[in-house]
Amino acid sequence: MLPTRNFKLIASTALLTMAFAASTQATTISCGDKYRSASVSSADACTAQTLGSTAKADDLKGITGSNWTMVSGLSSNGTNGWFNVSSSSWNGSSASGTWTINDLFWDNFTSALITMHVGGGQKDAVDNFEWLITPDSASGTFSYLRSSGKGGGLSNIKLWGTGTVLKDPVVQPPVVQPPVVQPPATQPPVVQPPVVEPPVTTPPVTPPPVTPEPPKEKPTEPKTPTEPPKETPDTPKEPPKVPEIPTLDLPPLPELPPEQPGKSVQVPEPASLTLFALGLLGLVLIRRKAAVKNAK
C-alpha cells in the first residue's frame, strides 16, 4: 500500500498534462516571457499567460483542466487564513519574498496552486503566473522581475486548492474476545424453611361483673291512722264465741277372749289421725265463720 503522500503526488503529477514547464524534482520553477519572469520554490510546474486581469476560477480551469477553489489572497504582507506572504515590494517592477501554507490546508485539499498577477502597461507581455506546488509543502520563496517594457508592478498573490484528501484507510483492530472465565463451582444455597410463627391468640375479654343496683324503694306514704270505731253505749258487747271442738265417737274396741290370739286390726297411724282431725276442725271453723258473717 502506498502512503498518503504518494497518493497526493500521483494526483498532482496528473496535472502535468497541462502546458506547464515540468520538473522532475520539487525545486525553484521559473516561467515568463522576454518582458517579465517569476519563480517559486517547492513547485513542480509553472505556466504564464496574458489575461488582462487577475485569473479567475474559470480561467484556471481552462489553463489546467481542473476545478480550483480560491483559499486565500494577499496584496500586502500578512496572513490570510491558511496562507502567509512576505514581500520586499508591492506594485514595483521587482520583488522577492517568502510564502507559507498552514498544515490544515493539506487536510482539506490534495493539490495547491499559487498564482501571481502583475499590472498591465505592456499589451503583449504576460500578466499572470501559476505554480503547481509540491504536495505537503509548508513554505517556499518567490521572486518577480520586469526585464523590459512598461507597467508590470506586483499586484497580488493567491493560494488555490483542488481535489479530495486521500487519507489512509482506517484499519480496524482485531476484535479480541475476552477469555471465558468459568465461574467457580458453588454449593447450592441452603434454603432455610420459613419460620412459621404461631398465631397470636387474644384471650377473651371477660366483662367486669355487673353489680345489680338495689331496687329503689318507693317512699312509703305515711299511713293515716284509722280511728277505732266508736262504740255505741246502747249496743251490748257479745262475748267472744269459743269454737266447739268436735269429739270423735270411736267404737269401743272389742274385747278379746282370753287365751285366744288377737286378730290383727288396722289402726290408723297417729299422724294420719292428727291430719284428719285438723282438717275436720278447719272445716268446722270455716262454716262457723261463714254463719257469723251471714248473721250480721
Image (cartoon, grey):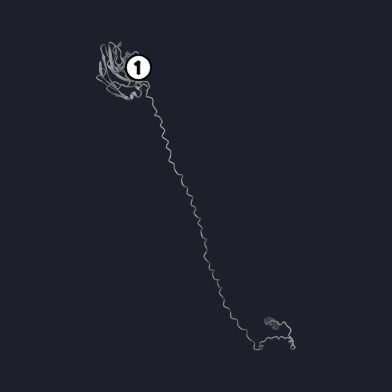
15 on left or right of 202: left
Figure quadrant of the N terminus: top left
User: Dot 1: what SS?
Assistant: helix
Of 229 and 131, nearer the camera is 131
Instruction: Please identify the residue farthest to the left as the structure is shown.
Output: 88
- 10 Å neighbourhood of mark 1: few (<14), some, or many (≥20)? some
139 relative to 210, above or below? above
Residue 102 on image: x %, y %: 31, 24
Residue 96 on image: x %, y %: 25, 18
Find residue 274 and report its image quarter: bottom right
The answer to whether residue 161 of the structure is visible from this angle is no
**Residue hosting label 1:** 13
The answer to whether residue 6 of the structure is visible from this angle is yes
At horizontal 35% and vertical 17% (from top left) the residue drawn is 13
Find residue 49 and report its image quarter: top left
Residue 82 on image: x %, y %: 31, 24
Figure quadrant of the C terminus: bottom right
Q: In this figure, what is the number of numbered marks?
A: 1
Q: Amino acid at mark 1?
A: Thr
Residue 103 on image: x %, y %: 32, 24
29 on left or right of 231: left
213 on left or right of 26: right
Find residue 222 and report its image quarter: bottom right
